Image (tube, rainbow, N blue to C red):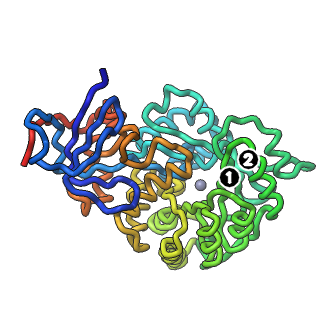
Amino acid sequence: MSTTTNILAGWLIDGSGGPIQEKMLLKIVGGKFAAIEQYNPETVPESCQFTDLSHCTIMPPLVDSHVHLFMSGTIDKRIREWQLVTGYDELRPVIGQHLHYLFSHGVLAARDGGDRGGFALRYRSEKEMHKGIVLKVAGRAWHQKGRYGTLIGRYPGEMENLAEAYAQENDAIDQVKLVNSGLNSLKIFGRQTQPQFTRDEIAELVSAAEQQGRKVMVHANGVQPVRLAVEAGCHSIEHGFFMGRENFELMAEKGTFWVPTLFTMKAYGANINYAQEGADLQVIEKNLNHQIEQLAMARELGVNVALGTDAGSLGVLHGESMVEEMKLFKKAGYSLAEIVQCATSNGARLLGIDDFGLIETGKTATFLVTRGAPPQLPRKLSYLEAIYLGGEPSELYRKNPVKHMVSKKD
Ligand SMILES: [Zn+2]
């Protein structure tokens, strides 16, 4: 016989982007949501027992659509340099620690955007290591020889084109990562770099990847690098600084996802002494403000936006940077329900996790409990009240187990 649990939620943000609902009764049977309805003390039978979370807000687990598990967001130069050269045996506990941070901030799914050794991929194959977190990985990214991307990947051989090089691979990756521009300048505002690949090369890669059921995520900043990738049919643009309005219009039309990683720029500003030499705080601030304006434009044009932090980048810590990224979405004019949608169901769609991202009847009852009313968000995500996995409070998250059963409440 399957167990039945009833939960009274003070507020429910269901991940769809729709209005926040108050006083909701969630019925969970056999680990899945069996009914979600407005709580009415008149109609609830006297014998109905439920866990009283009327002082809490409930929402789906978070999805970070862009992380690099092999790197810490630390500003300690020695640690960063070590992580960039060391091997899997040393990085294995580092990756484990990062996953622990993700979990304790309610990030129960993440997509790794690549590393030079396929470390996240190897870790993912050790299934007992990442209980409670759905991990999607891109393995080693593709870039052009001599261009940006060495830290996170490799390049096609001398006589190979991109799609041929990809076809030689048999890594068990989930998505393909391509690098099609350089990094953003922290010295010259809005400086753009050349694309690394042609539209045809990218289109061939996309087609080869799609045949294997994989999406292609493209690191691209600037008008041209983004345009070629979107026209070639890629599935998501990562970062996308300075891509401009026409690209957003095209992405809205084609349904291409955008992962704007705004907090990376804010973190450069906050840690400018550890950023590249000659970095200019005014340029960094202008870059950030421009990206916030672009996000407002994307919202207005109806672009699919998934929230991703680029955790592992300088000053961008795994887990807690989700809250920072959410705050910047607020600055771009997103409502709380819309921010949660980008950080839950949109991410789940981009990562291809069907049973995730929405609180609705029929889905697995995995969700976050935050103390207080919605205006306390996103801040309270740093101090979760509980994490439920398949209808049960997670034992992996022991901070404050919820255990107050009551019968009927007015
Ligand atoms: Zn990245």
Q: Is residue 227 above or below residue 7?
A: below
Please name the residue shown 35% across and 32% down the image.
31
Question: Image point 77% across, 51% down: which residue?
Answer: 207
- Amino acid type assigned to the residue bearing label 2 in the image: Ala
Which residue is most to the top?
1
Q: Position of residue 88 (x, y in %)?
A: 62, 33
The numbered mark at residue 146 is: none
Density class for disc 1 (Cα within 10 Å; few <14, some 14-19, many ≥20) is many
Position of residue 189 relative to residue 154, above or below, is: below
The amino acid sitting under disc 1 is Val
What residue is shown with label 1? 216
User: In terms of depth relative to the viewer, which is nearer, 297 or 327?
Assistant: 297
- Residue 297 placement (x, y as % from top left): 52, 76
Residue sitting nearer the eye, 244 or 407: 407
Q: CA distance from mark 1 to mark 2?
A: 7 Å
For the point 57% across and 46% down, the residue is 112
Farthest residue in the right direction? 159
Q: Secondary structure at mark 2?
A: helix
What residue is at 66 percent from the left and 76 percent from the top? 191
Q: Earlier in the sequence, mark 1 or mark 2?
A: 2
| Quadrant assignment, res 323 | bottom left
Marks 1 and 2 in Cβ contact (< 8 Å):
yes
Work out which quarter of the rendered image holds the N terminus and state it. top left
* Of 306 and 95, the residue lying toward us: 306
Mark 2 — residue? 209
Quick check: 89 above or below 306? above
